[in-house]
Amino acid sequence: MRISDYVDPMIGTVGDEQGESMHGGGKTHPCATYPFGMVQLGPDTTTSGDNGTGYNYCQDTIEGFSFNHMSGIGWYGDLGNIQIMPVLDKVDLRSGSNDEVPFERGTTGWKSKFSHENEIARAGYYSVLLDRYNIIAESTVAAHAGILRFQYFKEGKRGAIINLARRIAGKATLESVTIDGNKIEGNIVCSSDDGGFGRGRGGITYLLYFSMEISCPFDYEIYENECLMEKKSSYEGKDVHLYLTFEDTNEVLIKCGISYSSIKGARAGLLEISGFDFERVHRNAQDAWDEALSRVRVWGSDNTDLTLFYTCMYHTLLDPRTYVDALGEVTGSDGIIKGAGYNRRTMFSGWDVYRSQFPWLTLISPDTVNDEVSTLIDIADETCTSLPRWELMGADSHCMVGDPGLIVLSDALMKGICSFDFSKAYKYTLGASLVCEKMDGYKFFHNRPNNVQYKENRFEPNNLSSTLELLLSDFCMAQISKKLDQVDDFQLFSTYASRYKENYNSDFGFMCPRDESGEFLKISDPLDTTGCVESNIYQQSFFVPYDVEGLASLFGKERFISLLEALFEKADFSRLWNEYYNHSNEPCHNLTHYFAMLGLPKRTQYWTRRVQKEAYRLGAFGFCGNEDVGQLSAWYTLSAIGLCQPCPAKNEFYFNTPLFNKIKLRLNTEYHSCENDSHLYIVCNENPLKYPYIERVLWNDKELSRNYITYEELTSGGTLKFILTNKEN
């Protein structure tokens, strides 16, 4: 059995438009993918609502197969370009399920019913039977290209529609296409004026080049806005579709390379798929996933745990994806095409992923972390800005709050993952932290609140979440300063970080947002969401991961632990949303390990196991909430091997009981010291599913007297052994 056979891409594929909750599900996609690849080729059920991946398990029609998708996101999504749909005979020139572009002349559309019983999704492969046409559609991929195979089993005029105007949460702005023999090439302009991320509010604009080849001769018609246009070998317009027809064939293969920089880059991507050997491309994709997933091998007795672990690990290896094309070129944020010199990446959901996804990647793929930090620094340098908060296609969408780019950089720097320009890194992180208005004589666009309250007193009026997130950034800035021997800055930002205590309302007994004068808002219910982002006062009050002991003292340690315990006791971990511990959103993540930080490791072990078993399940409804670009999955994979890093830039991984008897993690000899061994082994003396509590921990045969292990120890290699018991006390 291949290790990739454990991956089930259908887990978490529920979107917003389903009956169980208004909040929606995991919002993952079942596309054929490649580890950190540029192409994600697979099905689109609708283009509507907050269906950001283009696919929702709860829908029953497919409108086509597009070459790039986002996974585990909200805010209406983006991408979904070059949508191809196989058809029979003449059909309407709209999909019939794209709410962003209404019909002009059609009624039914080209969409087709399908059944999940006739759908297969694996790592690197997807297939489905389109009921309306009796066509089997399959997809598989390389890093910069993908290939579709359509098998026609019904009489009729074999055809395919290539929808060049399609874009999730919007439409393309301009499309250019050239047809030459069996090759179709062109580019697609996508401007934020026509939607996309946040329906345009994210400000995401990009230019996609494509080079496509078809396995058999074809005739074609060109349509714009559903109108038949004069047949030409080259055409440019808005809302362009090609209607292809094929003679005397029951099988058509279409392969396509893409680039966000040039047509030459797209052609180079296409060369990753030689000929039209679909099965060979499929095997290569499987091999790539086997290699990527083999970085961590786990042995256990529960097949559900194995499936969840490798599916979650699979999701952590989708993003941040490569933005460099097959020529090694990339278009910078300044519009200049250049060789990046490293694997520049995109799709950085910073506010989500700094909590577990990037700590996980520092262990299993530190080169990806280094690439991402280098990317963030280059974007800041090209645009004279803070490091991006939520980056897509080289631009900062400014989604969410805080300064997560700085946080990820600080964590990488403290772990020695730092093959980037220190001077630039310090320049832009310091400029943002000091709320600088100019940088090198140019206007500097920072992501801090531009008000006197923040500049002088380090709080954002009426916004508790932003205040606490930025204070964590101050803590991280202090660690950067210390690492780079900037003593004065270290003292300054350490002082700033300690001011979290000023947000504690002793009369209320919780953290509380303050108004412009510094007075606490009149809030009496800790479940109130005033001043909180995707959280409430109760949940957000725990967010001081760099000083949990100090925070507990502020509340009174006994009361703090009681509140923390109640947070978990009152929660239903299987729900998509909770007023108490809410695993479906990030502010609560890692709170299970606060108990260990406060000297109560057994409560960490108890609650972590509960969350593992109740918030993660098999099937499309398997995730308790939005997967968030790898974050929800990374929390699981880290906890499944017995670890959690509650605070970035503190190289301390706290323990919980692993899910598996034995774990073997392959270290990276370029970024990890591997002083003792090139692997990290994690073993349990008993079955952890029957013995859920930790009695003792040994590191390379020496007993540890603390509830955590350092990153330096882990990456030096060796054996971490858990001596387990079935007794909590």
Image (cartoon, grey):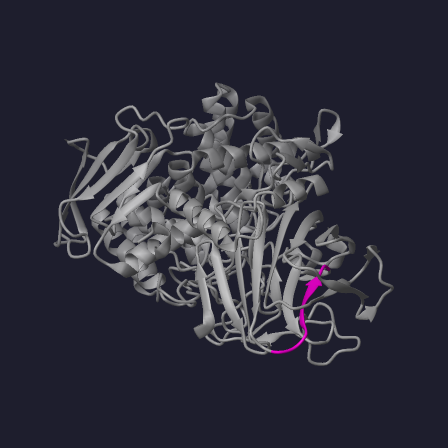
Q: Quadrant of residue 612?
A: bottom left
The image shows residue 8 at horizontal and vertical percentages of 40, 60
In the rendered view, does 533 fall on the left or right side of 570? right
Residue drawn at 35 percent across, 64 percent down: 617
The answer to whether any part of residue 581 appears in the image is yes
Between 266 and 150, the residue placed more toward the observer is 150
x then y, percent, for residue 128: 51, 68
The quarter holding residue 266 reads top right
Is residue 161 one of those drawn in magenta? yes
Q: Position of residue 262 (x, y in %)?
A: 71, 41
**In-front residue for pair 420/646:** 420
- Is residue 355 placed above or below 51 in the rendered structure? above
Main secondary structure found in the magenta portion: strand
The furthest residue to the bottom: 107
Instruction: Using residue 148 as the reference point, say whether residue 696 is left or right of it.
Output: left
User: Residue at left 69%, top 38%?
Assistant: 333
Which of the pair 641/211 is nearer the observer? 211
Magenta stretch?
Answer: 155-164
Residue sitting at the far front? 248
Q: Against 346, is 676 above or below? A: above
Q: How many dots with numbers?
A: 0
Tell me which corner region of the image, top left, top right, bottom left or bottom right, holds residue 699. Answer: top left
Q: Position of residue 446 (x, y in %)?
A: 65, 38
Residue 510 visible in rendering: no
Q: Is residue 282 magenta?
A: no
The N terminus: image quadrant: bottom left
